[in-house]
Amino acid sequence: MQSFIEVDKTFAGQPRELGPLLARIDTGKGREGLFEDQMPALLNRLAGDARIASITASNAIEGVIVEGDRAEQLADGSRRYRNRNEREFAGYRDAADELMRLETYEPLTVPFVLHLHRLLFAHSGGRGGHLKSDQNLIVSYEDGKRQVVFEPTAPEQTEFQLSELLVHYEANKHARGAHPLVLIGGLIIDFLAIHPFADGNGRLARLLTAHELLAQGYRVARYISIEQHIYESKHAYYAALYESQRDWHKGEHDVWPWITYLAEILASAYDDFEQRAAAANSQTGSKQEQVRSHILSNAPETFRRRDIERALPGISDATVRLVLAKLRDEGRVAPEGTGRGARWRRVESN
């Protein structure tokens, strides 16, 4: 809760480079309604892709790896789990899906945080929904040596500090004590410094980030995987957290490295979102012609059907299947395997 004890002090001295990032993000936020009105089919497809990418990437950041084909099966609701990784994947799926189904966003409370944590471990038998009972040091093993990177809040102080953090965060959010993204950044710094659970703190922090982005109207979190953007820059993610948590216990930490990183991630997500929307809007010809042209001219030599569907949001899977069948009959592509996960190979003409 250290970031919210002296808010004027904590959030003073905003870096100059952060202002343009926040302005870019707010511009993107202002355009979202236009895309939602004009391109609902595209957004539905993007939301489906972002869902799978977010579940996969947020788990992968913590070393919980589920491969692509299997990830899609689990995301679609498969309840046959092969190992603990798949059970943890399913837990994040359930928690993320609950957030995305919300139509209204209540203030964050300790019971809500415990509920999300319970969902995370509902399939894996962990102590979901229970605060830590033992100290959980954050350690690094660089160069083969164990080094304590950060010492979180002691177990006996955890419930109080978590409760105080959420109360102070909500009060500042209501009072508009700073830009919404700045406050969200402060929330996540403090949450991870408290480290309230024995396991799952990073994944839960990313769920809370998504919840608060949506609550504050940054709906890009539905259409572009923020977690995937974090995964692709995870070294910078950890470095920014480390920089912003130094001297946290004394209330002398610098929130700006982490908040700037988070703003860069969100600005990048808006750029990604608008580029995909523009690409979909610029396509010409019938939908079958677009699919045919993409497969013959732009797709890699071997690809899967879902790769084409993702590259051409707004075009149905039935249309992609129809075009693939026609190209197969013409001898332009050849299947390698069967079913949705089958690969296709483009046959070059002599």
Image (spheres, rainbow, N blue to C red):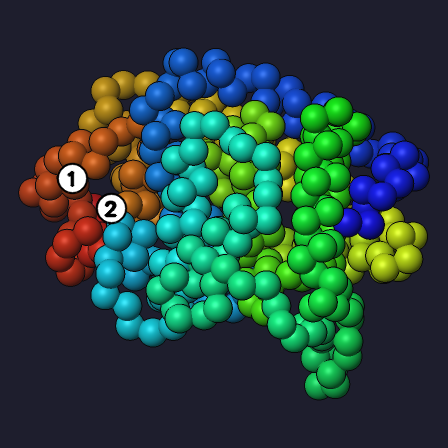
Q: Is residue 216 left or right of residue 180?
A: left
Q: Quadrant of residue 13?
A: top right
Looking at the picture, tell me which residue is in the foreground, 34 or 346.
34
Q: Amino acid at mark 1?
A: Arg
Above/below status of 126 relative to 30:
below
Q: Which residue is mark 2?
A: 305
Q: Amino acid at mark 2?
A: Arg
Q: Residues within 10 Å of mark 2 (few under 14, many from 20)?
A: some
Above/below status of 36 relative to 318:
above
Report helix, strand or loop for mark 1: helix
Above/below status of 117 relative to 65:
above
Q: CA distance from mark 2 to mark 1?
A: 8 Å
Residue 90, horizontal then vertical, whole percent: 36, 58
Q: Can residue 199 be spotted in the picture?
A: yes
In the rendered structure, which disc, 2 or 1, sits on the residue that comes first in sequence? 2
Q: Which residue is mark 1?
A: 321
Q: Residue at x 43, y 49 (%)?
A: 95
The residue most toward the left is 329
Q: Residue at x 52, y 31 (%)?
A: 105
Q: Can residue 185 be spotted in the picture?
A: no
